[in-house]
Image (cartoon, rainbow, N blue to C red):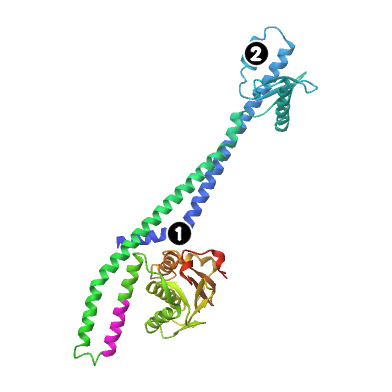
Amino acid sequence: MKNRLQDIATLDLYTNKNKIKWLIFICSIIISFGSIYYTNILVEELKNREKRQIELLARALEYASLNADNLTFINQEIIQQNTSIPVIVVDSDENVVDYRNINIKRRSSEEDKQKTLQKELEKMKAEYEPIVTEDALVFYRNSELLTSLKYYPYIQLSVILVFGVLAYAVFNQSKVAEQNRVWAGLTKETAHQLGTPIASLMAWIDYLRNSPVWEENKEVIQEMDKDVVKLRMVTERFSSIGSTPSIQPENVFSVVDEAINYLRPRISSKVEMKVNGYSNDIEAMLNKPLFEWVVENICKNAVDAMKGQGVISIDIIKESEKFVFVDITDTGKGMERSFYKRVFNPGFTTRRRGWGLGLTLAKRIIEGYHKGKIYVKSSEPGIGTTFRIVLHGSKEGISGFKREDFLIQ
């Protein structure tokens, strides 16, 4: 019971992962804007402090120009203490009288020096209004420290974002690899565990065939034999998932028809199943046991969606030499467009009982092993749903495909 509750909690966490992602995203946005807002407050405070310092410098210069005696304190404690804020003092005709903290090369000529000062002067004019004294104008701009602090939060957030993306990619990749190992190990062990009882059942069926009860229970024993054959196929499927399955050319119509013939007597008699092939000779690259599993899973979901009554149509289309389409259409309850991708997520189900792994398994088989594509082609609430499976028509294309190679309607 405890393990069951833990599994349910895990599934709830997984099914709500999009909400959790949005919550984390919103929290990140709040933290980011909070960091930028707080830094801007510090920048404004430092900016005002630098402005007051320049105003003090301007008053000191003005006082020094009027009182030539005993200027040691003013020069040392006020003027010389400015070692960070770029300042240019000009007269009424905008001729440079003095400057501080302007980066001028040591061996620059007087002409180059004046050009550099004029460029700096234009920057200062664009940044702040000058401080006016009795016979001069004092221009200034932000110190390097203030400029760095202004852009620091954006740089910091960019670094954090890059690190977060890389960390997420590495973590996600390692998690996928771990899931693959667990998945492969579980399927191999399941196939191994099923082998012994299936062999025993086969022996018992052979015994019944040669026993006096054969004639009286012939149909029952034959159905039992079919189920044992099906169990062997399930074992083969699990074994194939736990290893690299063999992908080879198969007649798609025959494979689909065989899967449907097995399903017909085992689902509601009110469900009509039709296989429509434009040609009975259409071949595609597939693994027969695994592909039959995909068809069965989609059809079983369709039966549930139709509540045991309706029509399932399977259309096999050779779109080109490169691709074969298998469209599975039901007359069930349909779905909204927002559910098109979610139906393939582990744990997503509309049934009270069920783990929601059928379509997840189908997606893994088609896209992971067959290098194809499976998606909801169309769906309309109250009308029905069409799933499209895209298979490769030849061995040359099995390495993958591009989205633009086929039309998603």
The circle drawn on residue 75 is 2
Is residue 136 on the magenta stretch? no
User: Magenta region, mostly helix, strand or loop?
Assistant: helix
The image position of residue 283, as x and y in percent, is 46, 76
Mark whose residue sits in front, 1 or 2? 2
Q: Quadrant of residue 44?
A: top right
Give the amino acid type for the residue marked by disc 2 in the picture. Asn
The image position of residue 101, as x and y in percent, is 64, 23
- Residue that badge 1 annotates: 16
Name the residue nearer the viewer: 122 or 41.
122
Q: CA distance from mark 1 to mark 2?
A: 68 Å
Q: Is residue 336 visible?
A: yes
Quadrant (top left/top right/bottom left/bottom right) for the C terminus: bottom right
Left or right of residue 48, residue 351 in this image: left
Give the amino acid type for the residue marked by disc 1 in the picture. Asn
Pointer 2: residues within 10 angstroms few (<14), some, or many (20+)?
A: some
Name the residue nearer the viewer: 148 or 247.
247
The image position of residue 242, as x and y in percent, is 34, 64
- Label whose residue precedes the other's in the sequence (1 or 2): 1
Query: What SS does tag 2 mark?
Result: helix
The image position of residue 164, as x and y in percent, is 48, 46
Quadrant (top left/top right/bottom left/bottom right) for the N terminus: bottom left
Left or right of residue 299, residue 187 in this image: left
What segment carries the magenta color?
218-230
Q: Is residue 264 above or below residue 79?
A: below
Left or right of residue 184, residue 359 in this image: right
Q: Is residue 229 above or below residue 400?
A: below
Q: Quadrant of residue 122?
A: top right
Left or right of residue 349, residue 53 in this image: right
